Amino acid sequence: MRAGYFSLFFASQLPGSALGASTLLRRQAAELTATATEARVTAVSDCSLSGTIQYCSAGTTSFQVSNADAATTGLASSYTGCHNHGTQTWCIAPDGEEVQLLPGNHVATATSASVTSPPASSTSVTAVSECHMHGSSVYCLAGETEYFVDTTVTATSELPPMFTGCHSHGSETYCLDPTGEDVQITLEGEEESAGGEEPSGKHCHFHAGVEHCVGGDSSEGESSPSCERVDRDYNIPLRIGLLFVILATSAIGVFGPILVTVFVPPQNIGFAILKQFGTGVVISTAFVHLQTHSTLMFENDCVGELAFEGTAAAIMMAGIFVSFLVEYAGNRLLAWHAAKKVAESVEESSSAPAAARTAQTVHIMVLEAGIIFHSLIIGVTLVVAGDSFFLTLFAVIIFHQMFEGIALGSRIAAAGLPGESPSLTHIHGGATAHPNPSSTAGPVDSRGNTDTKEGSAATAGALSMRKKLLLATAFALVTPIGMAIGIGVIKQFNGNDPATAIAIGTLDAFSAGILVWVGVVEMLAQDWMLGGDMSNASPVRTALGLAALVAGMALMSFLGKWA
């Protein structure tokens, strides 16, 4: 034991060592209390009263129990759960109150005579369990109430499953860790009084399965964050059950507008409002959700400093360019095909509606590709968020999927319907590739003749209901598929792994580029400026459309606070 004291003494001399300072205090306390702290006291018994002072024993060592009310409130015959607060030793009375142990010849002072009751919010807490991590901070539950535990868990140490023997010191509440040491617990949201990770104004939440903290002062000497995987609490049955809730929500959002067109004509003002709301959702998803999350992934400390700071923006630009290239090449190919048919004297009516239908399909496929990449990532990262934030994130994703489903579904529903602006409007080889779909007249041939019979053929250029439902089904299934993948890898997923963060950041930025192109060019500009249904709308229709557009942007941006 003497050798142990010497080693601790030398450790205490190390400058800046918290362990050394703590050890020095313990050594000084040992010298003051002599044999009282030679061996750890876990309980005292054989208590008796001498005057107004109570004495108890631990083996052959006698201790004074500091309790000013002993003469009037009655005495306990023993005290258990003894533990240390710095240099002091405290035990727990049968009624749960704490008393201090002093050496047998020590005279208690008025200030150490009693311990006040804890605040009402902590009085009933005797233990906390189901402990889990929020970043590098430890949180545990007492019933349904979450507490911040002021203790440190390193990458090489194990997270204690519970802390017991909870008791009060003045207005503060402490519990015992598995080694018998005291740790302070504080109600979640009141961590500032506990000296933990979030006292300096930090707020931590999950983005794409990675805990992200904002606020606080980074100059306070914080240690570098650990990039190792953190074990969290995962309620797997709950995640499996909610997978079907996400499936149902996504299906309602995307199938709803498609089925509505069976009963409501596309010229209906309600359908126009739905489309513009969807446009706002797509634009907000691109900028607020995808581009922001991509930047957060690339700024992750575990990724390190990027040689090129504009990486996220450059990848988004690549997504815009690829989307443009796909649509441009598709339209050129369709125009060439239509002109070839005319040159071969094949009846034009068979080529023009087909060209329109194919071009509209290209637009929808580009939009769906951007949304599907994003939705797959959402599904994976939703389930790998810890239980402490999972239900909050799930509630947000419910609305997120509903809004995105409406955005996609309204565009799928409107594809090729009368009154929609044409998607292929060139004049090639002296013949119009296809007419204005809102016209009842047929296509104009090279001699300027029209055929009313072909007007119905132009309308037939709309996507079939079967294809629309297939496109909607793909969206409805992709997020639940992502959730299933996430559940499969939940025990191995590490959002702070550099390769994972870079992969998520790349997909998010590329998807953002796709949705920027679709939302700004194909939806916003096409509807409002390039001959779409809102370009010459009535004042009332225009006002309602603008309100719906702004509402879609605002609501989806609001959800970006959590997802």
Image (spheres, rainbow, N blue to C red):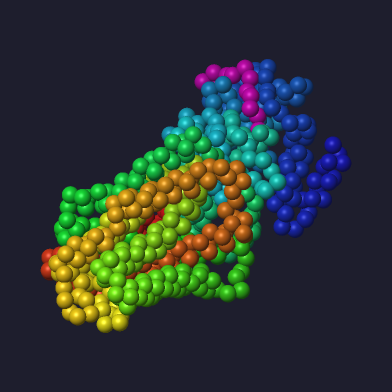
The C terminus, quarter of image = bottom left
The magenta stretch spans residue 155: no
**Would you place residue 472 above or below residue 233 in this image?**
below
Q: Nearer the viewer, residue 249 or 440?
A: 440
Tell me where residue 98 appears, x and y as whole percent.
57, 30
Tell me where residue 270 appears, x and y as whole percent.
18, 56
Give the side of residue 351 with respect to residue 200, left or right. Answer: left
**Which residue reaches farthest bottom?**
430
**Would you place residue 304 above or below residue 251 in this image?**
below
Q: Is residue 183 visible?
A: yes
Quarter of the view holding residue 224: bottom right
Span colored in magenta: 71-85
**Would you place residue 317 above or below residue 506 in this image?**
below
Tell me where residue 145 appears, x and y as whole percent.
46, 36
Q: Residue at x 47, y 46 (%)?
A: 481
Q: Residue at x 17, y 52 (%)?
A: 264
